């Protein structure tokens, strides 16, 4: 692990063991193949059960529900190692754990927890999270058009969700909809329910090793037992996004390590005018930027995890880390691509793949600008004028 400030000394032995096991598995089973999967636009579905066996899915949730029960920082290190290989793999795990398992854990009934969480943790079933809509984006509550109408013991759902990770491979979807009173409710919707469809989105140039879909609900009838009983406002889905953003703040540092390491090694071996380009001041400036930002980001993520376990974490803390770490990882990938020169535009190297993936990570789960406004409101007490 790239660790210029010896931050790994801050991790417990168990956390270091989790990180080492994840890296060993991913280096052996995934890294040699990710380039081809990404180029073909193929998600490696055969890895889902293996991720479950490794404890990658919802790993910080309690063991009594089939999860690994690890610390927040151990969970973060898993996200780091997944995204060091590819953002699409981390996205899969983030959705499964933070956006499907977490809402069931936090807002579901005990029966729902016992029914779904062990299967999701083991990778026996895959979940999706349906909040974003075609016209929603950064205003998921105000622009939510998906409706839930009560009909006896059932709710009838109608609407469309967009840019949904795992959508077309999921067995269940957590769908958020407004009822007749305007309350935002969460439902566990089996994807084989009549009226539910999930057409896959193709022709992506980012997150190509991840499944992205639309969710279409046409008179989808779900029993009231599928309602998450503790949901009822926008706070519920937004709290799920906080969990996912936490994992992103860790994960992108793995991508940063990947592009930095590749650029550093390339710069040492690439000879121009009789010297390695690593001897050029401008190249060293780029490398030092990457190393500096990784070091700061890792310390930021570690502290975030400690606050999470202590129960002192606020969503604004996560906004700062997501905003900072994603943007510096994206900029580092761009710089690495520059160092690689013409080689950097091919997927024989990792930089261009990470760079394109990070363009999406910079946008989803709250854009850089939205997190800026969240933080600005927190420190000033004022909503920024549009």
Image (tube, rainbow, N blue to C red):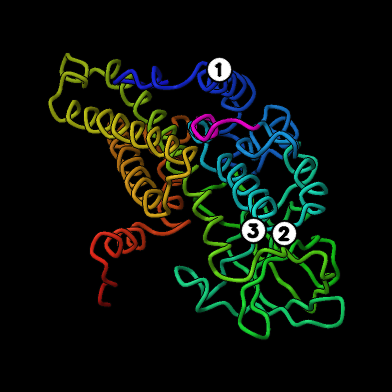
Disc number for residue 172:
none
Q: Is residue 176 above or below residue 22?
A: below
Q: Nearer the viewer, mark 1 or mark 3?
A: 1
Q: Residue at x 64, y 53 (%)?
A: 106
Badge 1 crowding class, 10 Å Cα cut-off, few under 14, some 14 to 19, many 20 or more, is few
Mark 2 — residue? 173
Q: Position of residue 104 (x, y in %)?
A: 70, 54
Disc number for residue 129:
3
Of residues 4 and 255, the one drawn nearer to the viewer in this rendering: 4
Badge 3 crowding class, 10 Å Cα cut-off, few under 14, some 14 to 19, many 20 or more, is many
Q: Which residues are magenta?
A: 69-78
Residue 306 in view of the camera: yes
Of residues 23 and 260, the one drawn nearer to the viewer in this rendering: 23
Question: Helix or strand or loop: what does disc 3 sit on?
Answer: strand
Is-magenta flag for residue 74?
yes
Q: Position of residue 120 (x, y in %)?
A: 74, 43
Tags 1 and 3 touching, CB below 8 Å: no
Q: Quadrant of residue 7?
A: top left
Mark 1 — residue? 17
């Amino acid at each position: 692990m790239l660790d210029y400030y010896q931050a790994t000394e801050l991790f417990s032995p168990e956390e270091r063991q989790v990180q080492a096991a994840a890296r060993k598995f991913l280096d052996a089973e995934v890294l040699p193949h990710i380039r081809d999967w990404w180029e073909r636009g193929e998600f490696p579905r055969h890895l889902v059960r293996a991720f479950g066996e490794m404890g990658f899915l919802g790993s910080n949730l309690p063991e009594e529900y089939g999860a690994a029960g690890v610390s927040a920082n151990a969970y973060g290190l898993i996200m780091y190692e997944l995204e060091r290989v590819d953002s699409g793999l981390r996205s899969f795990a983030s959705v499964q754990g933070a956006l499907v398992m977490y809402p069931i854990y936090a807002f579901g009934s005990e029966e729902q927890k016992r029914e779904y969480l062990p299967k999701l943790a083991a990778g026996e079933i895959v979940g999706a999270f349906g909040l974003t809509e075609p016209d929603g984006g950064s205003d998921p509550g105000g622009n939510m058009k998906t409706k839930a109408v009560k009909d006896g013991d059932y709710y009838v759902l109608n609407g469309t969700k967009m840019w949904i990770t795992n959508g077309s491979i999921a067995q269940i979807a957590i769908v958020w909809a407004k009822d007749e009173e305007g309350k935002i409710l969460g439902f566990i919707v089996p994807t084989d329910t009549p009226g539910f469809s999930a057409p896959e989105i193709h022709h992506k140039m980012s997150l190509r090793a991840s499944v992205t879909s639309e969710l279409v609900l046409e008179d989808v009838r779900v029993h009231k037992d599928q309602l998450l009983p503790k949901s009822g406002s926008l706070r519920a889905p937004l709290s799920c996004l906080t969990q996912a953003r936490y994992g992103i703040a860790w994960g992108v540092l793995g991508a940063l390590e990947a592009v930095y390491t590749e650029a550093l090694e390339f710069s040492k071996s690439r000879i121009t005018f009789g010297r390695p380009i690593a001897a050029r001041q401008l190249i060293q400036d780029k490398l030092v930027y990457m190393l500096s930002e990784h070091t700061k980001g890792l310390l930021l993520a570690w502290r975030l995890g400690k606050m999470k376990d202590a129960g002192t974490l606020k969503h604004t803390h996560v906004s700062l880390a997501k905003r900072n770490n994603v943007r510096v990882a994206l900029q580092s990938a761009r710089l690495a691509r520059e160092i690689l020169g013409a080689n950097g535009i091919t997927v024989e190297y990792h930089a261009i793949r990470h760079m394109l993936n990070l363009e999406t990570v910079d946008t989803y789960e709250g854009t850089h600008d939205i997190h800026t406004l969240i933080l600005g409101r927190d420190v000033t007490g004022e909503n920024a004028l549009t």
